[in-house]
Amino acid sequence: MRRVDNQSPVPKYYQLGQIIREMIENEELQPGDAIPTEMELCKYHGVSRMTARKAIQNLVHEGLLYREQGKGTFVAYPKERRNVSQLLSFTEEMKAKGKKVTNKIMLFEKNKPSKKIAKILDINPDEDFIFMIKRLRIVSGLPFAIELAHIPEKIVPGLKLEDIEKNSLYDLIENTHGNKLSYGKQSVEPVVLTAYEKEMFEIQDNSLESSLGLLFERTTYSEDGEAIEYTRSVYRADIYKLEYTLQRVL
């Protein structure tokens, strides 16, 4: 590890941050590795504790490091990326990346829809029923997203709990019940995770970086424009990001 240059006009906290960044980029520090403590950095580089703390905090803000209360500061794992131009289920998306997906079913029930949900799905709130399915999505053992799906009963008649325990919803909708998905409309916005969501994600860190999420709201449609499903999902923003491919149109 190179040392902070006390003669340089570049602020010491910035130099120290760059040194740690280079160690990560050069794979001297791997995802999940603990970085040296503030005191160790102070002693090795001859800087104040405030300088070391500021350098680390900046890297935490960037998402290169994360803190675990009572344990230390660690190199962050690369964030999962989503190409938002494709209509994929969560399971399809993760399997395409070689990730293992498991689910914890938190809710499975058949109910009358609220007026809001009925309007989104274009169904009658007084006559039609929907299935509500809430799942904790777990990727390679890590709690990743909380998903609440609303599906009209007529789309998946006779749906059972064991069906969703063994299959992806898109697989059930398309292959079991014969409803071809064609396109979807989706919005994304940043949110602050609730205490309940942080508990489900097993997040103990109270820092701002660990308290942010991404809220996805998606409605999927058949080729003839029939609403098939409305899903509201909250993803952990500390391990997930969106990726866009942009084309210049003149």
Image: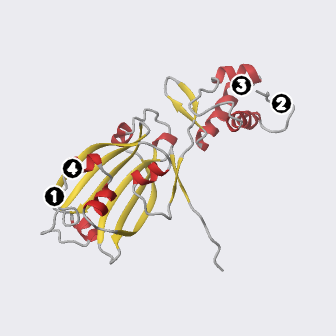
Mark nearer the N terminus (3 vs 4): 3
- 202 sits left or right of 62 in the view: left
Q: Residue at x 31, y 63 (%)?
A: 174
- Is 23 placed above or below 78 here? above
Q: What residue sits right under mark 2 in the picture?
A: 5
Q: Amino acid at mark 4?
A: Phe
- CA–CA distance in space, label 4 to label 1: 13 Å
Foreground disc of the pair 4, 1 = 1
Q: Nearer the viewer, residue 250 or 97?
A: 97
- CA–CA distance in space, label 2 to label 3: 14 Å
Question: Which mark, residue 108?
Answer: 4
- Is 32 placed above or below 63 here? above
Q: Amino acid at mark 1?
A: Gly
- CA–CA distance in space, label 3 to label 1: 66 Å
Residue 193 is situated, as x and y percent measured from the top left of the image, at: 40, 45
Mark nearer the N terminus (2 vs 1): 2
Q: Nearer the viewer, residue 203 or 156?
A: 156
Question: Which mark, residue 158?
Answer: 1
Q: Residue at x 30, y 53 (%)?
A: 148
Q: Quadrant of residue 17?
A: top right
**Visual colour scheme:** secondary structure
Callout 2: few (<14), some (14-19), or many (20+) C-alpha neighbours within 10 Å? some
Circle 2/circle 1 CB separation < 8 Å: no
Q: What residue sits right under mark 3 in the picture?
A: 48
Callout 1: few (<14), some (14-19), or many (20+) C-alpha neighbours within 10 Å? few
Q: Quadrant of the C terminus?
A: bottom right
Secondary structure, mark 2, is loop
Q: Nearer the viewer, residue 92 or 194?
A: 92
